[in-house]
């Protein structure tokens, strides 16, 4: 869409912070008030709008997109989002290991097992690990512990967690990213471990390169959101 404003700034509003475009309050795509809990996040979103050229490019505004998702989609369907995340806990990527070759087995253990151990200690949620494709049932107490931890997340952090889980294919990796156990690059590497190993063996095509670049960018944006909320 065409840019119809000159200045985008963060402003104090009832309940937090918002964005004003030439003095007019910015709304979400669903026309809800854009109210944010942290000034650094509001300033980052204002900077995204200010950086637009003659045409506004929504994909170039990842923080605006994540904040809008939190307000328009996650808050109205919070229980559904929590249920979706709970399903990942039962079939997490880091719990399913290769049986061969030995190099991949060793790499999965060195990268994923510390995350399993961290989740056990951080959430009191021991995870069962298996080799091959045979499903392994996770202890009910573990699933309950994860559910209790997720229920405590505020809408923006829950949005970040949901986006990270979908991007990484793993609730454990996503939690490690949101909780600061992993940075964005380490989360990408953990999530893409199997594919990166295959690329080392057989090479990478242009489609893979583009998809992985977009995935890396998405994970970095999620990590930035969490960082802005911490400041």
Image: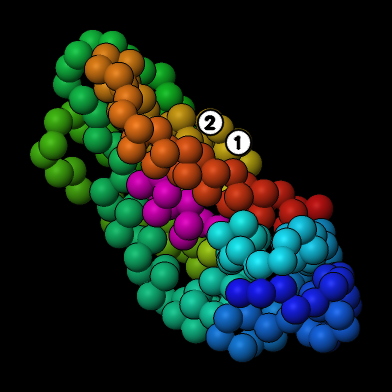
Which x, y percent locates residue 221?
Answer: 60, 50
Front residue of 157 and 6: 6
- Within 10 Å of the Cα at label 1, are there few (<14), some (14-19), or many (20+) other Cα atoms? some
Residue furthest out toward the top? 102
Magenta span covers which residues? 160-171
Task: Look at 80% across and 63% down and name the residue there.
Answer: 50
Task: Look at 35% across and 61% down and name the residue there.
Answer: 86
Which x, y percent locates residue 90?
Answer: 28, 52
The span from disc 1 to disc 2 (Cα, nearest Å) is 5 Å
Image check: 93 left or right of 33?
A: left
Task: Look at 86% across and 71% down and name the residue there.
Answer: 7
Task: Look at 39% across and 41% down and name the residue there.
Answer: 211
Image check: 66 left or right of 129?
A: right
- Within 10 Å of the Cα at label 2, are there few (<14), some (14-19), or many (20+) other Cα atoms? some
Q: Can I make out residue 16 in this image?
A: no
Residue 186 has which mark?
A: 2
**Depicted 209 relative to depicted 72: above or below:** above
Q: Is residue 50 magenta?
A: no
**Depicted 70 relative to depicted 133: above or below:** below
Front residue of 132 and 9: 9
């Amino acid at each position: 869409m065409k840019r119809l404003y000159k200045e985008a700034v963060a402003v104090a509003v009832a309940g937090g912070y918002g964005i004003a475009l030439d003095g007019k309050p910015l709304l979400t795509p669903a026309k809800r008030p854009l109210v944010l809990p942290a000034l650094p996040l509001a300033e980052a979103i204002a900077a995204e709008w200010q950086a637009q050229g003659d045409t506004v490019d929504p994909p170039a505004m990842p923080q605006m997109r994540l904040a809008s998702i939190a307000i328009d989609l996650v808050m109205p369907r919070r229980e559904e989002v929590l249920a979706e995340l709970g399903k990942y806990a039962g079939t997490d990527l880091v719990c399913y290991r290769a049986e061969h070759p030995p190099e991949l087995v060793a790499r999965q253990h060195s990268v994923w097992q510390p995350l399993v151990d961290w989740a056990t200690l951080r959430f009191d949620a021991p995870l069962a690990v298996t080799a091959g494709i045979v499903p392994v049932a996770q202890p009910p107490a573990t699933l309950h512990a994860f559910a209790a931890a997720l229920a405590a997340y505020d809408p923006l952090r829950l949005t970040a967690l949901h986006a990270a889980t979908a991007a990484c294919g793993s609730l454990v990796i996503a939690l490690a990213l949101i909780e600061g156990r992993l940075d964005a690059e380490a989360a990408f590497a953990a999530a893409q471990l199997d594919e990166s190993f295959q690329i080392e063996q057989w090479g990478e095509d242009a489609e893979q390169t583009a998809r992985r670049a977009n995935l890396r960018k998405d994970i970095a944006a999620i990590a930035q959101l969490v960082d802005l909320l911490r400041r």
